[in-house]
Image (tube, grey):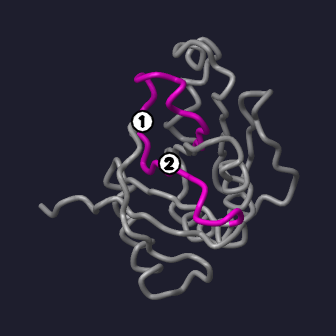
C-alpha cells in the first residue's frame, strides 16, 4: 500500500487563480464528497466555493451562508450544501440545526469554519487552509487529503500544477501546518 500524498502547498497569484484551482477540483466533487475550508476572514473561502459551483454548472446566485448557515444547490447530477459555521458558539450547534443529516451521504458538502463545529464532523475528503499570500492579491493554500477519494484528487491536482496547466497557481515551499488540521 502506498503512502498518502503529502500535503500540497500552493501559491495563488490572484482571485482568478483561486477560481482556476476551484475549477480544477470541481470534477472530483460528487455525492458524498466533503470539503472543509479554513482561513481568516477574507481569505477567499466563499470566492472559492462560488467558483467551484460555477465549474459544476450552477448559473444562479451564490450567496455566502454566513447568516443563513447553509445554502443548498441543486446541480444537474447531485445536490451540494454550502455551510458556514463562523457564527457557531457551541460545537454541537451544527447537529442541533440538523446539518449532520446533510453532510456526507448522497449530497456533497462544502464547510467553511469546520473547526468551530468540534470533533463530531465527518472526516473531509479534502481540507483547504487559505491564508494571505506575500502580497495583497495572492493567497497561499495548504491542501490535505483525509480519505482515499481526497488522496486521488490531491494527486491529480499536484500533477496538473506540476505540468503548469493552471495559470497563476504554483507550488510553494511547504510551511508549518495549521494547528486546526
Judge left or right: residue 125 versus residue 18. left
Please tell me how crowded label 2 is: few (under 14), some (14-19), or many (20+) other residues with Cα within 10 Å: many
Judge left or right: residue 5 versus residue 90. left
Picture coordinates of residue 144, whole percent (x, y)? 39, 53
Q: Nearer the viewer, mark 2 or mark 1?
A: 1
List the residue tagged with mark 1.
180
| Quarter of the image that includes the N terminus | bottom left
Marks 2 & 1, CB-CB < 8 Å contact: no
Residue 135 in magenta stretch: yes
Q: Quadrant of residue 156?
A: bottom left
Q: Quadrant of residue 111?
A: top right
Seen as rendered, the residue at the extreme left is 1
Marks 2 and 1 sit apart, C-alpha to C-alpha, by: 20 Å
Q: Which residues are magenta?
A: 109-137
List the residue tagged with mark 2.
33
**Image: 91 above or below 125:** above
| Residue nearest the viewer, comparing 132 with 57 | 132
Judge left or right: residue 82 versus residue 163. right
Picture coordinates of residue 61, whole percent (x, y)? 87, 51
Please tell me how crowded label 1 is: few (under 14), some (14-19), or many (20+) other residues with Cα within 10 Å: few
The structure residue drawn at horizontal position 54% and vertical position 65%, both measured from the top left corner, is 25
Give SS at disc 2: loop
Count of residue discs: 2
| Residue nearest the viewer, comparing 118 with 175 | 175
The structure residue drawn at horizontal position 73% and vertical position 55%, both measured from the top left corner, is 47
Picture coordinates of residue 120, whole percent (x, y)? 42, 22
**Image: 121 above or below 131:** above
| Quarter of the image that includes the C terminus | top left
Residue 32 in magenta stretch: no
Give SS at disc 1: loop
Badge 2 or badge 1: first in the primary sequence: 2
Amino acid at each position: 500500500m502506498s503512502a498518502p500524498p503529502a500535503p500540497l502547498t500552493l501559491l495563488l497569484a490572484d482571485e482568478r487563480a483561486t477560481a482556476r484551482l476551484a475549477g480544477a477540483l470541481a470534477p472530483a466533487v460528487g455525492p458524498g464528497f466533503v470539503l472543509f475550508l479554513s482561513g481568516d476572514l477574507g481569505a477567499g473561502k466563499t470566492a472559492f466555493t462560488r467558483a467551484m459551483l460555477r465549474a459544476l454548472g450552477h448559473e444562479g446566485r451564490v450567496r455566502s451562508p454566513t447568516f443563513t448557515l447553509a445554502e443548498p444547490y441543486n446541480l444537474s447530477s447531485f445536490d451540494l450544501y454550502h455551510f458556514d459555521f463562523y457564527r457557531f458558539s457551541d460545537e454541537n450547534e451544527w447537529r442541533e440545526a440538523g446539518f449532520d443529516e446533510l453532510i456526507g451521504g448522497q449530497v456533497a458538502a462544502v464547510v467553511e469554519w469546520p473547526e468551530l463545529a468540534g470533533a463530531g464532523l465527518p472526516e473531509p475528503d479534502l481540507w483547504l487552509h487559505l491564508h494571505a499570500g506575500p502580497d495583497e492579491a495572492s493567497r497561499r493554500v495548504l491542501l490535505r487529503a483525509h480519505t482515499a477519494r481526497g488522496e486521488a484528487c490531491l494527486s491529480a491536482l499536484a500533477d496538473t500544477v506540476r505540468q503548469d496547466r493552471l495559470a497563476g497557481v504554483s507550488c510553494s515551499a511547504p510551511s508549518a501546518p495549521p494547528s486546526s488540521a
